[in-house]
Image (spheres, grey):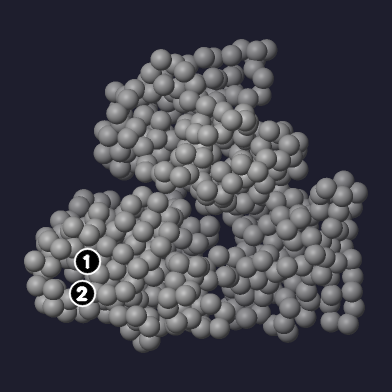
């Protein structure tokens, strides 16, 4: 009787819902699914969380060396193997009252007997003069995403914790000199990594130092620091640039529940020894929680403890509500291989490996209408790779057709290669990708195909109404890096808007192949969005944020 009542209330019902797809959330999903409970993991952007921007992980027990993406991808596959479901969606609201919890997202409403909050934290802004003015033009927050922009330049790292130390070492791959500015008298991270930074020949450390100002005329030209009892100014040599990377801690992602659950000073989630929050059936895990050490190893520990604690709570509710436990089927999975010096394309001659193809098939089988990928190619090797990519995609679905237009060297305009999404009659649907949508942008591209051919992702009716009501034409360009985890959110928003509106076009550019855009708009950080070749914005943005910007231009 209880089961029937719940099905009437929910679009989809699970035993447990995990909000957040980082190491803590993925570990919780592994434990819950392995215990044969129905579990859903909801992630706003990309499974893996903040650790996916870490290029080298060497302190995770039992794994000699890997990177954040491979580590968390294997965690996801483990959870999927045990039967966990995954959904990319933005959570809008939580109802935590009663035995049955509700999670309202932009992709529907889901209900469960318990919730694990693994929402994490995001980089903190310091607030020094010029920080926001020069964000994307010299001030950055992600070394993996933006480090390459500062090749051969001086770089300042602001912060004294683990992230600052780790990213300072990473930035030595690109920078001429890295200077770490620590506000306190010592590093606050583990002594081992602090000593590695202090001993590095390309890193200079300044203790009791903080940044006061960053300035310049359109681009970053100087910075002012306060070091102990003196103030000094840095200016690069004429014609040279420099960078400021801010790693000053994190802001807890608590907006969904800050007025519903007990929080500690600073906004972090208060939990007991079992990771339980102030409400029964709600648990916390990972960087959102109060803790002394924010590392992958502590995140997975939190996830395991939260899941096993929630199991007991779910079991008691099964008895109370007279529910019958349903079977959770295991799935086939293959672990990610460790990276080698050769890419899949170099080994097999194909862009898409067998595992990617296996995951694509059920998505592409759902396409409702035929679409045409129109490839405009030039004489460069990257265009030949783009052509190979198109041929592989067309072999995966009868709904995907490709046309190829190859320009001679004299005809090429610099916009190639480009992949334009067109309908079955060859009409341009408003969005194109310049380059090859690999790395973090491959999923974005597949989602664009899914939205163009149908059935498409669900969308808030009010947002859709606004998009379709646009009466002014806008040309939008987005400059991205395939290694950036913050770019896909913006790319997917722009592609969706262009597909739904006849007035908007969205061109996505892989920065690696279009350096002229970097120079034209003085881009030193991605993602970068340019509207009508005039309005420039940096940082990730969701669908509603982009719509609001367009409404006010």
Q: In the picture, which quadrant includes the N terminus?
A: bottom left
**Classed neighbour count for the residue bearing mark 1: other residues with Cα under 10 Å, few (<14), some (14–19), many (≥20):** many
Q: Position of residue 57 (x, y in %)?
A: 49, 64
Question: Left or right of 276: which side holds 343?
Answer: right
Is 258 in front, or is 334?
Answer: 258
Question: Left or right of 456: which side holds 189?
Answer: right
Can residue 313 be seen in this snapshot? yes
Image height of 318 relative to 404, above or below: below
Q: Position of residue 471 (x, y in %)?
A: 59, 30
Question: Left or right of 311: which side holds 392?
Answer: right
**Classed neighbour count for the residue bearing mark 2: other residues with Cα under 10 Å, few (<14), some (14–19), many (≥20):** many
Q: Secondary structure at mark 1?
A: strand
Q: Position of residue 536 (x, y in %)?
A: 70, 43
- Quadrant of residue 511 in the image? top right
Residue name at image x 18 percent, y 57 percent:
8
Is 455 in front, or is 121?
Answer: 455
Is 158 in front, or is 466?
Answer: 466
- Quadrant of residue 41 in the image? bottom left
**CB within 8 Å, label 1 to label 2:** yes
Q: In the picture, which quadrant includes the C terminus?
A: top right
Can residue 438 be seen in this snapshot? no
Q: Which mark is residue 15?
A: 1
Q: Which mark is residue 361?
A: none
Residue name at image x 30 percent, y 31 percent:
367
Question: Left or right of 31: which side holds 143?
Answer: right
Q: Which mark is residue 314?
A: 2
């Amino acid at each position: 009787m209880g089961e029937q009542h719940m099905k009437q209330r929910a679009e989809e019902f699970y035993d447990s819902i995990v909000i957040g797809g980082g190491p803590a959330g993925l570990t919780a999903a592994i434990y819950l699914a392995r215990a044969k409970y129905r579990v859903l993991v909801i992630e706003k952007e990309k499974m893996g969380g903040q650790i996916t921007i870490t290029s080298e992980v060497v302190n995770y027990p039992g794994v000699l060396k890997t990177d954040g993406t491979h580590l968390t991808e294997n965690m996801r596959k483990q959870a999927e193997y045990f039967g966990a479901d995954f959904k990319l969606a933005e959570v809008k609201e939580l109802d935590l009252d009663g035995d049955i919890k509700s999670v309202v997202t932009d992709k529907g409403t889901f209900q469960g007997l318990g919730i694990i909050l693994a929402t994490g934290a995001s980089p903190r802004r310091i607030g020094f003069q010029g920080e926001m003015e020069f964000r994307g033009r010299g001030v950055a927050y992600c070394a993996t995403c933006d480090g390459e922009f500062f090749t051969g330049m001086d770089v300042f790292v602001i912060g004294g914790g683990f992230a600052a130390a780790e990213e300072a070492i990473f930035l030595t791959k690109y920078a001429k000199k890295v200077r770490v500015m620590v506000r306190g008298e010592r590093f606050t991270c583990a002594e081992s990594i602090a000593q590695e930074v202090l001993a590095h020949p390309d890193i200079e450390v300044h203790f009791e130092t903080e940044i006061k100002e960053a300035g310049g005329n359109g681009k970053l030209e100087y910075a002012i620091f306060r070091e102990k009892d003196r103030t000094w100014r840095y200016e690069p040599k004429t014609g040279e640039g420099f960078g400021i990377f801010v790693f000053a801690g994190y802001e807890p992602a608590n907006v969904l529940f800050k007025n519903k659950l007990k929080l500690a000073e600073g906004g972090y989630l208060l939990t007991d020894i079992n990771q339980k929050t102030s409400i029964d059936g709600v648990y916390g895990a990972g960087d959102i929680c109060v803790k002394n050490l924010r590392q992958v190893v502590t995140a997975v520990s939190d996830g395991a403890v939260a899941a096993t604690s929630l199991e007991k709570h779910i079991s008691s509710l099964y008895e109370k509500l007279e529910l019958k436990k349903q079977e959770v089927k295991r799935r086939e999975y293959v672990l990610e291989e460790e990276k080698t010096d050769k890419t899949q394309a170099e080994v097999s001659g194909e862009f898409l490996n067998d595992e990617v193809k296996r995951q694509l098939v059920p998505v592409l089988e759902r396409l409702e209408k035929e679409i045409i990928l129109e490839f405009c190619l030039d004489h460069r090797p990257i265009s030949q790779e783009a052509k190979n990519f198109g041929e592989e995609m067309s072999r995966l679905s009868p709904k995907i057709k490709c046309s190829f237009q190859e320009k001679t060297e004299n005809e090429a305009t610099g916009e190639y290669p480009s992949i334009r999404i067109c309908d079955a009659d060859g009409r341009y649907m408003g969005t194109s990708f310049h380059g090859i949508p690999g790395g973090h942008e491959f999923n974005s591209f597949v989602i664009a195909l899914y939205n163009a051919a149908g059935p498409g992702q669900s969308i808030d009716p009010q947002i859709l109404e606004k998009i379709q009501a646009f009466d002014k034409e806008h040309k939008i360009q987005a400059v991205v890096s395939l290694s950036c985890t913050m770019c896909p959110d913006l790319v997917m928003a722009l592609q969706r808007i262009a597909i739904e509106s006849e007035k908007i076009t969205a061109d996505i550019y892989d920065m690696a192949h279009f350096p002229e855009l970097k120079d034209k708009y003085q881009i030193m950080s991605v993602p970068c969005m340019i509207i009508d070749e005039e309005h420039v914005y940096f940082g990730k943005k969701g669908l509603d944020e982009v719509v609001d910007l367009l409404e006010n231009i």
